[in-house]
Image (spheres, helix red, strand yellow):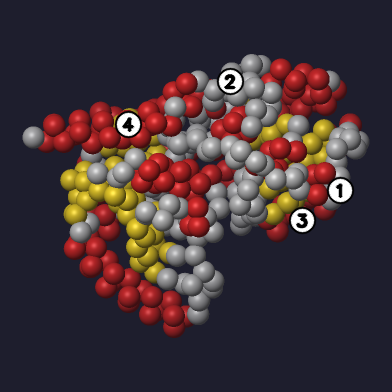
Amino acid sequence: MRILYYYSQLNVGGAERSTVRLLNAFAEKGHEVTLLLRWDGGTVEGELSPAIKRIYLKRTGGGPIGKWKQIAETLKCRVRERRLKKHEYDIVISGLFGYDPRILFRRIRAKQYYQLLRNDVEKTGAYGKTALYMEQYGARFDAYIGVSKYTTQSFCKCYPQYASKARTIYNILPDVPSAIGAVPQIMADGTDKLRILSVCRLADKAKGLFRMVRVCKALHEEFGDAFCWYIVGNGPDRAELEKRIHAAGLAQVMRLCGETSDPFVYYKGADLVAVLSYYEGLCGVVNEAKMMQKPVIATQFSGIDEQLRDGYNGYIVKNDEESILQKMREILKNPEVLQPLHINGMPEELLNNGKKITQYENLFHELKQKES
């Protein structure tokens, strides 16, 4: 198949890494893949297969650009958009729900158009501009693909008129490196403590960062230096998060590790992975942690029941501060309860990457037959 995938920019993040894995899997299967990006300079682009063609609508050279260059790039973007009509594709996939899709229908010729659903649509995509885009373009998509059953159901609840077009195809899971490097020094210093790890984009609205600080403060008051909490990632709320950590007196307890291209060295050093988001789609961090057979504590967000069985391969708690605190207290009082959770334990339909690509292929042929 000739596939075009549309995205904004491939910076470090769960959605971006799962995008790279999906495109690489398509290319490995022999499909002709083109990635259309609004901006260049994404930090995970280097992980793309050389077989994947890339088209940039605007180019920055990987750094900030001045006013006049922005104007010049806007003009060049219009020219580049017009050139898109030169090629025809079997499938166009829009990788971000709520990202204006008009370019896909105005500039790109394709047999089928798919929209990926990466988040809980009830919380992130049933309002404002998204609702307007759906009003204008919703009927033009041939399929809506949720990355978890919950995500698909959430979309159907918000847009029941398109429920017949909705499918679920799980994200491609990462391959655990055969050789994982040494645990970072920042974690190696805390070997006598319970090492809690959170890997996320530093954006409080989705990831519950400031709630984590309050939880950490309460635990520190009760358990002292029995644990250390490491946060890996970057994002718009980093400065505010750092400010709150210092204000709470937690600078030596809650450690910001920055961005990384290799999260597996951090998983290697972790005793417990904490994913305490307000909402997700199908959380890539949970997938990565379980591929490393690490215990996970997660809040009740979309897709988590498809990844974890509470008490079997992780803990699922209600999505509120008191429930998080209660379970974390239980763990810190008796860390031995984590030992049975050192397993993968995810269902086969989540683990079978080959089946996921086959589902895309089958969907294309199914819709093709309906058209004929």
Q: How far apart are marks 1 and 4 (CA)?
A: 48 Å
Q: Distance between the residues labelled 2 and 3?
A: 38 Å
Q: In this view, does 200 lie above or below 271?
A: below
Specify whether residue 94 is in view: no
Q: How far apart are marks 3 and 1 (CA)?
A: 13 Å
Q: Which of marks 3 and 1 is in front?
A: 1
Quick one: label 2, few (<14), some, or many (20+) residues within 10 Å? some
Residue 213 placement (x, y as % from top left) = 75, 43
Please state which amino acid type lies under the numbered disc 3: Lys
Q: Mark 2 points at which residue?
A: 345
Quick one: label 1, few (<14), some, or many (20+) residues within 10 Å? few
Please state which amino acid type lies under the numbered disc 2: Gly
Q: Mark 1 points at which residue?
A: 252
Whether residue 239 sits left or right of residue 80 in the image: it is right
Residue located at (57% from left, 43% from top): 206
Which of the two discs, 1 and 4, labels the residue nearer the N terminus?
1
Residue 359 placement (x, y as % from top left) = 32, 30
Q: Based on the displayed image, in which of its 4 quarters is residue 290 positioned?
A: top right
Disc ID at residue 243:
3
Q: Is residue 63 above or below residue 117?
A: below
Q: Mark 4 points at which residue?
A: 358
Q: Which of marks 2 and 1 is in front?
A: 2
Q: Distance between the residues labelled 2 and 4?
A: 23 Å
Residue located at (63% from left, 48% from top): 262
Q: Nearer the viewer, mark 2 or mark 3?
A: 2
